[in-house]
Amino acid sequence: MTKFRKLNRPTGHRMSMLRTMVSQLVKHERIETTVAKAKEVRRLADNMVQLGKEVDRAGGYTRLLRTRIRVGDAAPMAYIEFIDRENELRQSKPPTPQPPQRVPLDPWTRSRLTRQFAPPKEEKSTDSDN
């Protein structure tokens, strides 16, 4: 049995509202709604995209951006938008480059490098004039 939010609505009204919101999301690529509704729409929209697209991503086709508190009832509002589209509110993060792997040096190379790049030794000078 799958868990879902009832959103304080009867089943028919809830399903109709969510269907409409998913179709509006597909049409406009970004909609503003309450956070609870946006979470349900994201679940349904990701499933719809997964059905219609060849699998090149593990999931997460939508992004939820919290925006403001609605004035009338203090409900938290959010934008839900598709990822990888033009005019995004927030750009996707580029993949972080991996740091280069350090290869351990063999003892012969290490001794040669320390000899070559070592600071010059100071020789003690003897002053016989004093």
Image: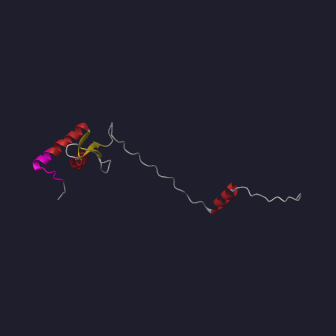
- Horizontal side, residue 65 vs residue 2: left or right: right
In terms of depth relative to the viewer, which is nearer, 1 or 81?
Answer: 81
Q: Nearer the viewer, residue 124 or 118?
A: 124
Measured as percent of width and height from the top left, residue 2 is found at 18, 57
> From the image, which quarter does the C terminus lie in?
bottom right
Residue 15 falls left or right of residue 121: left
Q: Which residue lies furthest to the bottom in this view?
A: 107
Residue nearer the viewer, 130 or 38: 130
Residue at x 86% of width, y 58% of height:
127
Question: Seen in the image, is 31 located left or right of residue 110?
Answer: left
Q: Position of residue 3 (x, y in %)?
A: 19, 57
Q: Which residue is drawn at 20% across and 46% down?
A: 73
Residue 21, by quadrant, is: top left
Front-most of residues 72 and 14: 72
Q: In this view, does 104 lie to the left or right of 56?
A: right
Depicted 97 relative to depicted 23: above or below: below
Taking the magenta stretch, the answer to whether it contains residue 56 is no
| Tag count | 0
The magenta span reads 5-16
